[in-house]
């Protein structure tokens, strides 16, 4: 097979970090740099990559370039699949819009054979299980983290919880009618 080599000119990134002179010597310093100077995640990413190449940044701030490209491409692909929607007719005849693809198929313990369906589709039994697991195991952590922010800022956590409950009740009612 012929070699596949992608060359990306990052001269502008190098100029940017040389002009800005951020402290990227370690993670704590880079976080302080971002917060103190109002730098965006995109800019910090450019600083980390260009800084590593120029010897101005801790090499552990971001993974090696090939891994960055792979994870970035995977994230873009996953986001693209997440935007795919379908109109599904419910038993009562109403139509709702759902994501076409839910996520990667979970590997089964002891499953040595390749799965033929690498992504769970909305109409799969696994989609229902995944949705329920997500609601029970992931969403509460997100809610708790936001409640912690409200509490840390002396906000009214009980009022936020009541609003959330009303919103959930309204969604359930809309789907149950």
Image (spheres, grey):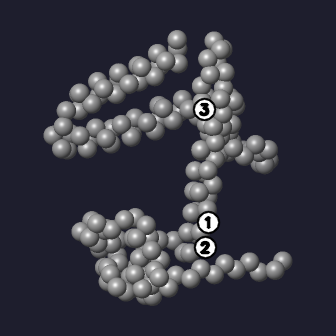
Query: Closest to the observer: 16 or 47?
Result: 16
Residue 112 image position (x, y, % from top left) = 77, 48
Instruction: Tell me the number on the disc at residue 70.
Output: 1
Alpha carbon distance from label 3 to label 1: 28 Å
Residue 144 image point, x, y percent: 33, 38
Residue 49 percent coordinates (x, y)? 47, 77
Q: Nearer the viewer, mark 3 or mark 1?
A: 3
Q: Which of the 4 quarters of the picture holds residue 31?
A: bottom left
Q: Earlier in the sequence, mark 2 or mark 3?
A: 2
Question: Is 64 left, or right, of 159 in this rendering?
Answer: right
Of 158 and 6, the residue lying toward us: 6
Rendered residue at 81%/80% (across/down): 2
- In 3D space, how far apart are the residues under numbered discs 2 and 3 (Cα atoms)? 34 Å
> Left or right: 51 with respect to 149?
right
Residue 98: mark: 3
Closest to the observer, 173 or 123: 173
Residue under circle 2? 66
Residue at point 46% right, 80% down? 13
Residue 60 appears in view: no
């Amino acid at each position: 097979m012929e070699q596949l080599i992608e060359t990306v000119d990052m001269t502008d990134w190098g100029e940017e970090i040389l002009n800005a002179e951020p402290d990227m010597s370690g993670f704590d310093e880079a976080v302080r740099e971002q917060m103190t100077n109002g730098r965006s995640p995109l800019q910090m990413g450019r600083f980390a990559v260009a800084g590593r190449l120029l010897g101005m940044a801790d090499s552990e701030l971001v993974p090696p370039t090939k891994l960055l490209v792979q994870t970035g491409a995977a994230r873009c692909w996953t986001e693209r699949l997440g935007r795919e929607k379908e109109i599904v007719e419910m038993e009562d005849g109403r139509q709702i819009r759902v994501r076409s693809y839910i996520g990667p198929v979970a590997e089964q313990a002891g499953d040595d054979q390749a799965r033929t369906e690498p992504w769970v589709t909305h109409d799969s039994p696994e989609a229902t299980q995944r949705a329920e697991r997500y609601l029970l195991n992931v969403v509460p952590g997100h809610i708790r983290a936001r409640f912690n922010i409200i509490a840390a800022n002396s906000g009214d956590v009980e009022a936020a919880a009541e609003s959330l409950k009303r919103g959930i009740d309204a969604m359930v009612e809309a789907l149950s009618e």
